[in-house]
Amino acid sequence: MNIKLLKFVLKTRVTSGYMILIFIFYFLQIVYAVMAYFVGRTVKSEFLLAASLIAFVSFMEISLAGFNYKKSDFDFLFMIPLNKNDLAKSFFITSILISSLFNFFISYILLFTEHGYFAFLGLIDIFAILVINISLSTILRKYPLRTRLFVIIPLIIWYVIPGIINFPFSPVSAFTGHIYYGTFISLILSFLLVLYVYNKSGNLPSTYYKFMTRRSSQIKENVSFSGMSTTKAILSFNLKMLGGVSIMRMGSTTKVYAPRFKVTYTLILSMGLAVAYTVLFFYLPKSMYFIVEIYYLLYAVIIYPFTKGYSASSTERLWLSIMAMPSYKYFRLNAIGKSLSTGIFLVPLIIGNLILFVIIGNILFIKMFAITMAFGMLFTIIGYYIGGFYNTRQITDLGELSGYARHSLGNVITVVILFPLILIAILSVFLNLVLYIGIIALLIFSFSLILSKKINKKMQDRMIKRDFV
Amino acid sequence: MYCIDFNNIKKYFGNNVALNDLTININCGESISLIGPNGAGKSTTIKILAGLLEPDSGDVLISGYKPNTEEAKKIIGYLPEDASPYLTLSVRENLEYLGALRGIDDLNYKTDFFLDFLKLREYERNKVSSLSRGNRQKLSLALAIMHEPKVLLLDEPLNYLDIPSQEDVIKYFKKMNSTFLVSTHIMSIAERFTDNVIIINKGQKIWEGEIKQLKNRGEEENASMEAVISEIMGGL
Ligand SMILES: Nc1ncnc2c1ncn2[C@@H]1O[C@H](COP(=O)(O)OP(=O)(O)OP(=O)(O)O)[C@@H](O)[C@H]1O
Ligand SMILES: [Mg+2]
């Protein structure tokens, strides 16, 4: 093991502030385990939640975490005759450290272990699952997304199964009442995978490189902006090309992969989602309603809309947009356009909730209807501005990253801001008062973002300061 | 009135001084090359003129307007170093989108003109993310000048361009009758663009005059123009 190299790789990917944060989070996890020791108990009804939480985080980790390369790595680092295995190991350990931030977010499942002292065993399980995920991510990264999904999807299903039926043979089983089986499986599996990565991963950077440089070329359908007014052009930029607003990023590597979808695709997707969501409730016991609703809220109403706004700054081109018109006008129109496109995505879900209310008659659905209507679009606006202020990544060229683009405390600020917003949205399911105040507060917040010339100018200055061009 | 009026500008980045009391005045219709070594402050100067950065002290006016105003934006054509258009859009879409943002009248005509002029027609439907560096630079150039700006601020405009394209672009620029400030560190490019040159180093002006003078001095001293410039730069 080449410690110097590891330090170099780590330093070029994370700031020291972020490293400190990782260790704070590790510490907090132990605090969590201690808490779980005293108050933890098995709660069968939470098994599904626990399993799907792990599955979701694992999905993110496997699809993204192994992709910690930068352009400068290919340009310089890999050109140096270093031991390939040392390189691979350094990247692997770095990925584990970076991704261990996720662990904190799933450590609340420690509360569901059978006996208090299992909580500490659970800590090991969580870490072992992380190691499994990162190893797989490392092994799989040379394959295109479609191939990777062939491995990832069955694996995720394997993770979720213990949440649904009594099934001891999964790494996740440790959190669904089978602590010994689960721990055994995750330890063995992580050990085998690490062994594989350590011995076989030497050539991964070069194989991955081939994948990174593959290029897409012609677009299928030209969107014409000719003859449009400024307003109309910005709106149709956002409304005709749904999902394509951001360039795909993989970990901290950028592949300038500029996917674009027609609005109809996302609409079909959200229709499918809405149908599944609606049908589900006809079969779900009433006790499960809230759990499903919280998931629905988190992903469809908060995270997707927020990310859509947030990631917009990665593709922004100030030298074109801000030179063509005042920043407040441009940012404002863009935020509105993106929020409208979120609105289109949410329409089927809004209708689904309405149908559920009419047929099942539970007041919960009218609430979800209101929350979806009110919060979804506002979260895109808020995400757009927070992205402008804090998103450090601007993808300017083939594989190029801005100098600031490391995992840093700055990225964490976003989470800090997002947290109370998520809290408001979730609490509003349970408390009407929060719902009313939340809607008004978010309305005022997002409208002041859109309307204030000062905030828009500040955002422009912030972006320029971070060398956005 | 100067079209580019850049007076006693100071700009700090933290404790580092990027521009130290720099003054550049350019009459309307005139063009000047801004030359200097890496880190001299060329890009910073151009960004301040474009209204993207604000100076710590000093006054800037573009044809009498403050750079960050709408009036100024209408007459400025700004091309940053290593410019990148919208990557998710195709070449044609970029031209049309920016044309719409700028409210250009004869947009269809303009789009077609630039596609042909810069030989981008065959890439019309290609996403920018798949273009070569040179073609991306051509598109960037078109995006910077398609609204026929009166004042052009160009940061290393000929980077990545092949020689015939360089010639075409320079010819086109000369026809535009605009005021130019072109930053470059390649003397031969400066010479093809403009008659006058300002040499800066460490944020200060160290020489101003006609390129001809530099050439003559080089002939007298039996040295290349580059050697003369190096000598001037070494003088600070
Ligand atoms: N965003 C920034 N933050 C901190 N310092 C900066 C920033 N932008 C420029 N500088 C500093 O200001 C000085 C001038 O930089 P500038 O980019 O204007 O140089 P340049 O003449 O364009 O150089 P080059 O020929 O390399 O493009 C340099 O010392 C640079 O490090
Ligand atoms: Mg420069």
Image (cartoon, grey):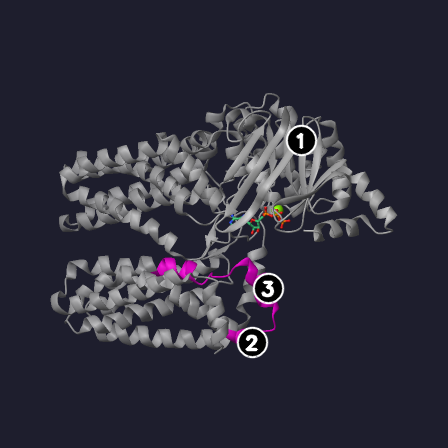
Point 27% across, 38% down: residue: A375
User: In the image shown, does A93 or A454 lie closer to the viewer?
Assistant: A454
Q: Is residue A315 left or right of residue A127?
A: right
Mark 1 or 2, which is nearer the eye? Answer: 1
Q: Residues within 10 Å of mark 3 (few under 14, many from 20)?
A: few
Q: CA distance from mark 1 to mark 3?
A: 42 Å
Secondary structure predominantly adopted by residues drawn in magenta: helix
Q: Which one is earlier in the sequence, the residue at label 3 or at label 2?
A: 3
Labels 1 and 3 within one chain? no
Label 1 sits on residue: B26
Q: Mark 3 = which residue?
A: A76
**Residue contact between numbered discs 3 and 2, judged by CB atoms under 8 Å:** no
Is residue A76 one of those drawn in magenta?
yes
* Residue A410 place in picture, x, y as percent: 38, 52
Kind of residue at disc 1: Ile
> Camera-side residue: A150 or A96?
A96
Q: Which residues are magenta?
A: A58-86
Judged from the image, the secondary structure of the residue bearing numbered disc 1 is strand
